[in-house]
Amino acid sequence: MTPRVLFHPGGLRPIEAVASFSFTVPGQPIAWARAGSFNGRRFTPARMRDYQKEVRFHAVEAAPDDWPLDHAKGYRVRVAVYLGNRRRADLDNFAKSITDALQGRRDPAGGWKVPPIAYDDDTRIVELHALKLFDQCDPRVLVEVETL
């Protein structure tokens, strides 16, 4: 694997991935949607919730059993979004829907309401690459997660 170069305060340095996994989410990608509220309670729209379940399903199938969820040096995430149409859409919202689906959610008691798949918290992502492409015949999202 050829080392990639990352900007950091000390200049340029190569950062090599230690471990990685990748997966594909078939179908039209869905961008992150702001939570709605009803009677003062916030909720995630059903369409967004269902899409994140699908992302999690494909990620669980691809992730190694010994995948580190709290890697000290962080993670690199690559997302390639293939849209089925040329509608206006913010690339960062597609990346957010994927990165949010891969992290866990804690319950008030301190356990996991939704167990993490790639990392325990998306604040551990230190490098993010995203592409928006168009493919009318095969809309999908390609995702690669690497430890650094």
Image (cartoon, rainbow, N blue to C red):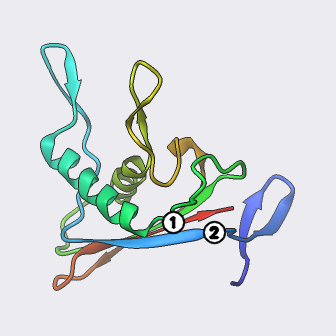
- Percent across and percent down for residue 47 are 14, 48
Marks 1 and 2: CB-CB under 8 Å?
Answer: yes
Note whether 94 is above or below 14 in the view shown: above
Q: Locate residue 60 relative to residue 27 in the image: left or right.
A: right
Locate residue 117 relative to residue 9 in the image: left or right: left
Mark 2 — residue? 19
| Along the viewing direction, whichever of 65 and 12 lies nearer the viewer | 65
Question: In the rendered structure, which amino acid carries the disc numbered 2?
Answer: Ala
Which mark is drawn over residue 64? 1
Q: Position of residue 131 (x, y in %)?
A: 42, 71
Closer mark to the observer between disc 1 and disc 2: 1
The residue under the point 63% across, 68% down is: 19
Q: Pick the residue in front: 34 or 1.
A: 1
Where in the figure is residue 139, as x and y percent of width and height? 22, 76
Identify which amino acid the numbered label 1 is placed on. Pro
Residue lying at the far front in this picture: please name it.
65
Tell me which residue sits at (61%, 57%) in the image: 75
Q: Does 13 sit left or right of 108 as displayed?
A: right
Quarter of the image where one finds residue 109: top left
Judge whether residue 82 can be spotted in this image. Answer: no
Residue in the image at 40% along x and 19% along y: 108
Q: Disc 1 versus disc 2: distance between alpha carbons?
A: 10 Å
The total number of labels drawn is 2
Q: Which mark is residue 109?
A: none
Quick check: can you spot residue 71?
A: yes
Instruction: Assign a secondary structure to mark 1.
Output: loop
Q: Quarter of the image for the N terminus: give it.
A: bottom right
Placement of the C terminus among the 4 image quadrants: bottom right
Comes first in the chain, label 1 or label 2: 2
